[in-house]
Amino acid sequence: MSKSDFNKRSINIIRPYMNQIISLQLSEPFFIKNFFRKFPIDTSFNRLESLVLNDLNVDDDVSILNSLAQLPRLFSLKIFCYDCNELFIIFQSIFLLPVLQYAKILCSNFGARFPFPLATSDNQRSMTLEYLAFDGPPHFSSIYNLLSYTPGLRRLSVDQIWRDRYTPLIQFILPRNLTSISLCHCRLSFDEFASFIAIVGSELNFLRISIVHQTALSNAYQWQQLILHHMPRLRTFLFDYHGSLNKDADGNNRCRTLLDEFSSPFWIERQWFFAHSHYHRFSQEACLAFYSTQIRRQYCCQIDETLDNNICSYQDPVFNLSFGPRINMKNRNIVANFPFQFPRVTELELTENYDTINIDSFIDNLIPSDQQINTVDLVCNNNVRNVGIHGELALPTVQLINKLFPRMECLEISDGEDTLISLVRTLLSNRINNSHLFSLVFYGADDDDDDALIKQLKTMIDNEKLLDNYDIEHRQFQLCLWW
């Protein structure tokens, strides 16, 4: 939402109807800061049931989290933040919310992660929380400690898990009614994961795991036994392994053997099917991707591998790219002839990966062949609202971005500071082609030069009258512009 729209809605919608608002979503740090300055959380929001804080500055706004305890009907809370020096501050606050049932906490850069103490009394525990999703803490011990605060938890989703030497004590109060677990970027060995499932897996009917430890693919039988003995109610099993190539004692890859093992009657009867592909990590190490066929259709379509179909003789069909709502591209083979015709896609990220992608060439490929002669009349029809481009862009390419993504609301660019002024000028000068755009984020800004750079941007914007009402803020490695 633009700054002018925010001020209008504050006067005409928020203030007169504070006690009738049921759901509230606040995005962008400028927007959140302005909102809570105008409307401090108190009993005036007595019907608020769902709150989303997207890009909250937790370290500066701890008082916002503490004030949420005054909301008598807050059942759902989502917090997305960039920096957080104390993870426990967030969880300590949400566990004190009286009726909270759903919590999702995502942070791209956690600072201090410890200590994360055990819950020792019911006053510290949330008896109502049933769904918890977060992308930290990464260490196994912290996850056990965190679960001691949520005895009624039914669904758990964790984005990062790292190994450590930790064994839970018997007296831990852990949730016994977990029906759904999703673990992404899991670095546990199979035995460590099996020990965890033995404690919390008896009621599971949904398991999604993305794992990198090679023991996860020792054989299919170990997974079969784990499911039969500790997850007897499991109905959905989404498995994704990305890691070292699995080889036998003679040094031969076991891809075909693995696919045969995971095609036994046990897996077929449950309609759980698997596929594989190969790629080179860091352009050298041969790696294996072994995954459930369902997992890539339902979630983000991430093309981040330098695919290599010559590592083994047995190949699966390439999965259908048209399903996922998000696309992350780093692969030159896909980019070369990529037809951007996916109506469900709302988020696109382009990353230059070891010189395998020329982003300018990729954007040229988005332009239909019959329109390449005259870009002035270029017409694109897609629903992409968030665009992230990590790599250098030529100014002629920047001039096309607004036309290529006519519904774009937020653009994130990683580029050098020496081109930042010209990039902003070009993007804002062409805003007539995109009335939806209200936010620019630039990565790679130097903390030491932030004041001087902000001053230059303000001078340029004001002198050339590119924006009337805007804010500029520097966060860690980011420069954010909102209007």
Image (spheres, grey):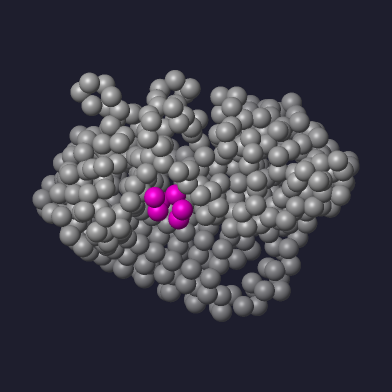
Q: Quadrant of the N terminus?
A: bottom right
Establish if 164 lies above or below 249.
Answer: below
Residue 149 seen in the current view = no
Side of 28 relative to 173 (left or right)? right
Point 41% across, 69% down: residue: 75
Where residue 18 sits: x, y (%)? Answer: 59, 75
Magenta segment includes 102:
no
Where residue 249 sits: x, y (%)? Answer: 20, 23
Side of 315 relative to 11 (left or right)? left
Point 48% across, 43% down: residue: 318
Point 71% across, 43% down: residue: 366
Query: How many numbered dots are placed on residues in this image?
Result: 0
Residue found at the very far front of the displayed protein: 313
Q: Which residues are magenta?
A: 293-298
Point 52% across, 61% down: residue: 52
Side of 351 relative to 438 (left or right)? left
